[in-house]
Image (cartoon, rainbow, N blue to C red):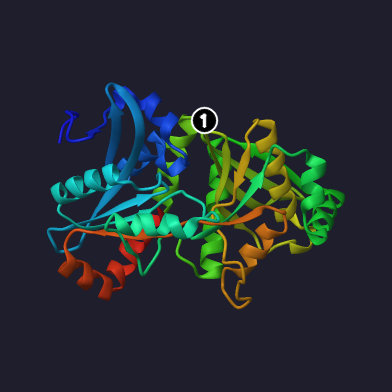
Amino acid sequence: MTEEEYMSYRILTDKVRTAYDKQASHIIQSWEWGEFRKKTGVDVVRVGHFEGRTLKKAYQLTFHKVPKLNWTIGYFPKGPMPDKGMVDALEAIGREKNAAFIKIEPDVIQTPNSKLQTQNIEKLGLVKAKKALFTKYNFVLDLTRSEEQILAGMHPKTRYNIKVAQKKGVEVYDSVEDKDFEIYLKLYFETTKRQKYFGHTPTYHRLAWKTLKDSRMARVMIAKYNKKPLVAWMLFSFGDTLYYPYGGSSTKYKDVMASNLLAWEAIRLGKKLELKTFDMWGALGPEPDTNDPWYGFHRFKAGYGARHVEYVGTYDLVLDPTLYRLLSAADTLRWFLLRATRF
């Protein structure tokens, strides 16, 4: 499909890149993220809804091939709240891409009238998905508050741990140097191996780093003790938000609380960059199971006094009911191509 107008939408080209990014509310919907995903071999489609020549709504989704079948699955994370015009466009594009279904996860936080929001989504013909890819819950911290206010809102143990790290001489710095990215990558894969969870490939991380760093949207932050790197995070920025999606740590010198100081310095960095929100990328639910393997991450993030939010959830636009049922029975195609290569 070309950029010619079709119904109420158009497929976008890079001529509208600047206008597109003004419409995107999340880094995963940014033009730069789409460019990164293209480099991983994923089919990226960008859609714009216009009034005359004015771009009113823009978003992107990806299509992933079903192994050994002439079908695809669409994935549309962190976009706007679906409406009829969007669903009509997605259905037309999905059928052109031979998609069995499109998984939709809006970047919309639940509100007191969330029941009405959910009803409106289901009226559009979307079905509640049995499995989500992006976490339904998150921690978001208000960076417009003063440092004193943020510190006062933290759990006392978190404040104490920050002071311990400062007293013991932990050093934290941020960088856009490739040599520091390699430090991050080493610690990241040490952590995934130790904690036995699925992580991105080195190629994925390198492509994300190169693409987003060149657009001044990515940096790493590293905490050292006795000149030894103990903790490293990859941080993204887009719009008015700082994101903490990935991190890794060493098992050495756990008592110096390097992670706590790094998180505090990340918050201070966000304020220095005049951003408004620190998005911690995910959390467990309001009553987390202490035996959940992610509970440690959840508790760590909760210590910083961020707001715990719930999104409206995950929905599927089903285009082929029979194949949809078959794929769902197969655990939505092996965690949907290993969680769509983690977004």
Q: In which quarter of the image is residue 272?
A: top right
Q: Which of 49 and 134 is in front in this view?
A: 49
Check disc 1 and give the amino acid type: Arg
* Residue with the mark numbered 1: 216
Q: Give the quadrant of the N terminus.
A: top left
Q: In this view, does 62 lie to the left or right of 309?
A: left
In this rendering, the answer to whether 286 lies above or below 341 is below
Q: Residues within 10 Å of mark 1 (few under 14, many from 20)?
A: few
Residue situated in front as seen by the camera: 313 or 210: 313
Is residue 279 visible in the rendered image? The answer is: yes
Q: Is residue 70 left or right of residue 278?
A: left
Tell me which corner region of the image, top left, top right, bottom left or bottom right, holds residue 155: bottom right
Q: In this view, does 307 lie to the left or right of 213?
A: right
| Image coords of residue 72 (percent x, y) | 20, 56
Task: Name the residue rendered at 82%, 42% in the picture.
Answer: 148
Residue drawn where x is 51% and y is 66% of the image: 193
Q: Is mark 1 on a helix, strand or loop?
A: loop
Number of dots carrying numbers:
1
Q: Does residue 42 appear in the picture of this structure?
A: no
